[in-house]
C-alpha cells in the first residue's frame, strides 16, 4: 500500500511540475527615480507558449526582460522561472537584448562557444548545439568571420543564436527583428517557432505586430509599466473596432464597429441609397497597437 | 559547483585573452616606446646621477609607460559597456566576480609581461645593474601590476566614454609619473614637488622597483605594502561600482 501511495505522490508531483508555468512574473515594480518603468507588471507564460509582448516605447517591455533575466532587481513583486528565482534559474534562460550585445572582434562560432560554455554545455554537446543553432538560424556561411564585419541582419541572427544555443526553457527576445530584412525575419521566426514546438516558453517583444500572428502567439499589451490586456489574439482583439466601408455613387463612408457584419446589415436595412461597394475589415493587431498608442 | 566556476572562469579568461590579442596596438606601443626612450635618456640620466642613472632611466620609463597602460585596463572594461556585452554576461550563469577575474587576469598577465620585458631589456641592453633576487623583482612587478589593474578598473567604472578615459588616464599618468620621479629624479625636483611626491603611487612604484632591482628587500616591501593598500582601496571601489552594473538600464 505504501508503495502505491509513493508512486501516486511521485506521479502527482511530476504532473504538477509539468503543469507549472515556465514564467510567473507577478505584480513587478521597478522605478528609475520618479519614473515607474514597471508598475504591478504581471505576466505568466507556459512551456511551449509564445507570448507576444507589445506596447509603445517606454511601456516597460525592456525593463521587464532585464528584470526577468536578473540584470535588474525589481523593487517589488515576485518572479519564478520554472519555480526558481531568476538568479537560480539563469541556466534555464536565454536572452537576446533589444540592442546588439556582441563582441565585434570574435567570430559567431567563438561567440556561441562562449555562451554555450557559460551555460554548461561541453565538448561534443557544445559542438552539436553550435551546429544545430547555426543551421536553424542560417549562420553557417559566416560562422568563422568576425562579427564586426557582418551585416546588421547577420548580427541579429548571431545574437538570437547566442540566446538559443544552450536550449533554454525560457527565451526572452527583445525586438529580435528590429531593422532586419524579410529573409532574416523569416529565419528568426522559423527558429522561434521551432523552439516553442520543442517546449520552450518564449516572451517575444516586438513592434512588428503581424509577426505575432505568424508565430501564433498569445498577446500581452503593456502600457505605462503594466499589462493592460492579455489573452489569445481573438480575445484581445474582441473589443477593438473593425471597419465597414460603403461606397455610394458620390461618396465613401467608413463606420468603425466591433461587429462589422451586424453593422453592415443594420446600415443596409436603413439606407435607401444604392450601395456600389462593400468592404468589411476585421480588427487586426495593428488596430490594437494603434488603440494602445492612442489611449496613451 | 566549484568545477562549474572553474570552467566558466577558464572560458572567460580564454575569451578575454583572445579579445586582448586581437587588439594589441596599445600594448605593443607601450612596449616599444619605453625601450626607445630608455636608450635615448640613459646618457642624460647617467650624467645627472653617476650612481643610479641607468636604473633611473629604466625604472622611470617602466613606471611611466605602465601607468599609461591604465588606459588599456580601462578600455578592456569600457568596451564591454559600449558593446553592451557586460549586461549580456550578467544575464548568464557567470557571477560578477567570475566576470571581473576573467577580464582582469589576462590584462594582469600582459602587464607583468610588459614590465618583465622592459626590466630584461634594461638590464641586458641599457646595462642597468641588477643585484636583487628574481623572486623580489617578480613580487614587485606583480604588486605594481595589481595596483594598476585595480585603479584602471575603478577608473573604467566611473568614466562615461573612451574620450573621458583617454583624457583622465593621459593626464593622470603624466601627473603620477612626473610627481613620482619617473621623469626626473625626485632629488632634482623643487621642494614642494618633493613634499607632494609620496602622494603619487608612482613614487612608491619607483621606490619598490628600484629597491627590488638593487636588492633592498626592506624598502621594496614597505613600498609594496603601500601599493597593495592603494590597490585594495581601488579594487573595493571598482567592485562596488561594477556590481551595480555600471548604472541601471532603462527601457
Image (tube, grey):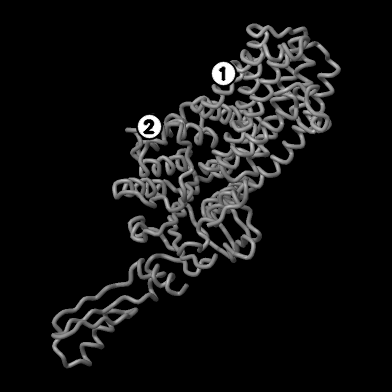
Label 1: state its secondary structure. Answer: helix
Whether residue A12 is visible to the viewer of this picture, yes or no, is no
- Residue appearing at x 33%, y 68% in the figure: A284
Q: Mark 1 points at which residue?
A: B32
Could you say which quadrant of the image residue B237 lies in?
Answer: top right
- The x, y position of residue B8, in whole percent, is 59, 32
Q: For the residue carrying disc 2, how many other residues have a C-alpha within 10 Å: few (<14), some (14-19), or many (20+)?
A: some
**Classed neighbour count for the residue bearing mark 1: other residues with Cα under 10 Å, few (<14), some (14–19), many (≥20):** few
Real-space CA distance between mark 1 and mark 2, rounded to the nearest whole angstrom: 35 Å
Does A292 sit left or right of B67 as displayed?
A: left
Secondary element at image label 2: loop
In the picture provided, is B187 more to the left or to the right than B172? right
Q: Residue B49: image x %, image y %?
A: 76, 13
Chain holding disc 1 = B
Eye-nearest disc, 1 or 2: 1
Chain letter of mark 2 equals A
Whether residue A19 can be seen here: yes
Residue A278 x/y as whole percent: 19, 79
- Residue A241: assigned label: none
Q: Dot 2 corresponds to which residue? A: A143
Question: Foreground: A177 or B146?
Answer: B146
Amino acid at each position: 500500500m505504501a508503495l502505491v501511495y509513493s508512486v501516486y505522490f511521485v506521479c502527482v508531483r511530476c504532473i504538477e511540475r509539468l503543469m507549472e508555468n515556465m514564467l510567473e512574473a507577478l505584480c513587478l515594480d521597478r522605478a528609475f527615480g520618479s519614473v515607474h518603468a514597471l508598475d504591478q507588471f504581471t505576466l505568466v507564460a507556459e512551456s511551449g507558449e509564445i507570448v507576444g509582448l507589445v506596447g509603445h516605447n517606454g511601456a516597460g517591455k525592456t525593463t521587464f526582460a532585464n528584470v526577468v533575466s536578473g540584470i535588474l532587481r525589481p523593487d517589488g513583486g515576485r518572479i519564478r522561472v520554472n519555480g526558481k528565482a531568476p538568479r537560480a534559474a539563469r541556466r534555464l534562460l536565454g536572452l537576446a537584448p533589444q540592442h546588439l550585445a556582441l563582441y565585434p572582434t570574435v567570430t559567431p562560432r567563438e561567440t556561441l562557444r562562449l555562451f554555450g560554455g557559460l551555460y554548461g554545455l561541453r565538448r561534443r554537446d557544445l559542438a552539436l548545439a553550435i551546429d544545430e543553432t547555426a543551421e536553424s538560424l542560417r549562420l553557417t556561411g559566416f560562422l568563422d568571420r568576425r562579427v564586426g564585419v557582418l551585416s546588421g541582419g547577420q548580427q541579429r541572427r548571431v545574437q538570437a543564436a547566442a540566446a538559443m544555443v544552450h536550449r533554454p526553457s525560457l527565451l526572452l527576445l527583445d525586438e529580435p527583428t528590429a531593422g532586419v530584412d524579410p529573409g532574416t525575419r523569416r529565419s528568426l521566426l522559423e527558429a522561434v517557432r521551432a523552439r516553442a514546438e520543442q517546449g520552450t516558453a518564449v516572451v517575444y517583444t516586438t513592434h512588428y505586430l503581424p509577426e505575432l500572428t505568424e508565430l501564433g502567439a498569445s498577446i500581452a499589451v503593456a502600457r505605462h509599466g503594466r499589462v493592460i490586456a492579455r489573452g489569445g489574439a481573438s480575445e484581445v482583439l474582441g473589443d477593438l473596432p473593425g471597419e465597414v466601408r460603403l461606397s455610394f455613387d458620390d461618396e465613401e463612408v467608413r463606420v468603425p464597429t466591433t461587429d462589422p457584419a451586424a453593422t453592415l446589415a443594420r446600415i443596409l436595412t436603413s439606407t435607401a441609397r444604392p450601395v456600389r461597394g462593400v468592404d468589411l475589415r476585421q480588427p487586426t493587431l495593428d488596430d490594437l497597437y494603434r488603440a494602445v498608442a492612442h489611449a496613451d | 559547483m566549484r568545477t562549474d566556476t572553474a570552467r566558466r572562469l577558464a572560458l572567460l579568461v580564454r575569451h578575454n585573452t583572445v579579445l586582448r590579442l586581437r587588439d594589441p596596438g596599445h600594448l605593443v606601443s607601450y612596449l616599444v616606446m619605453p625601450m626607445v626612450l630608455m636608450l635615448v635618456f640613459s646618457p642624460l640620466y647617467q650624467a645627472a646621477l653617476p650612481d643610479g642613472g641607468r636604473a633611473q632611466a629604466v625604472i622611470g620609463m617602466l613606471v611611466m609607460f605602465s601607468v599609461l597602460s591604465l588606459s588599456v585596463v580601462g578600455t578592456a572594461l569600457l568596451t564591454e559597456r559600449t558593446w553592451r556585452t557586460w549586461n549580456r554576461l550578467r544575464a548568464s550563469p557567470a557571477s560578477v566576480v567570475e566576470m571581473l577575474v576573467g577580464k582582469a587576469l589576462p590584462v594582469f598577465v600582459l602587464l607583468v609581461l610588459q614590465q618583465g620585458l622592459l626590466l630584461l631589456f634594461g638590464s641586458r641592453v641599457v646595462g642597468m645593474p641588477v643585484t636583487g633576487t628574481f623572486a623580489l623583482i617578480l613580487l614587485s612587478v606583480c604588486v605594481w601590476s595589481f595596483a594598476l589593474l585595480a585603479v584602471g578598473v575603478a577608473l573604467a567604472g566611473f568614466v562615461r566614454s573612451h574620450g573621458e578615459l583617454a583624457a583622465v588616464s593621459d593626464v593622470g599618468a603624466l601627473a603620477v609619473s612626473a610627481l613620482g620621479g619617473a621623469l626626473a629624479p625626485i632629488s632634482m625636483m623643487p621642494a614642494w614637488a618633493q613634499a607632494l611626491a609620496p602622494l603619487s603611487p608612482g613614487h612608491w612604484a619607483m621606490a619598490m622597483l628600484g629597491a627590488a632591482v638593487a636588492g633592498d628587500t626592506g624598502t621594496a616591501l614597505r613600498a609594496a605594502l603601500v601599493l597593495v593598500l592603494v590597490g585594495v582601496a581601488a579594487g573595493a571601489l571598482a567592485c562596488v561600482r561594477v556590481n551595480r552594473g555600471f548604472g541601471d538600464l532603462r527601457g
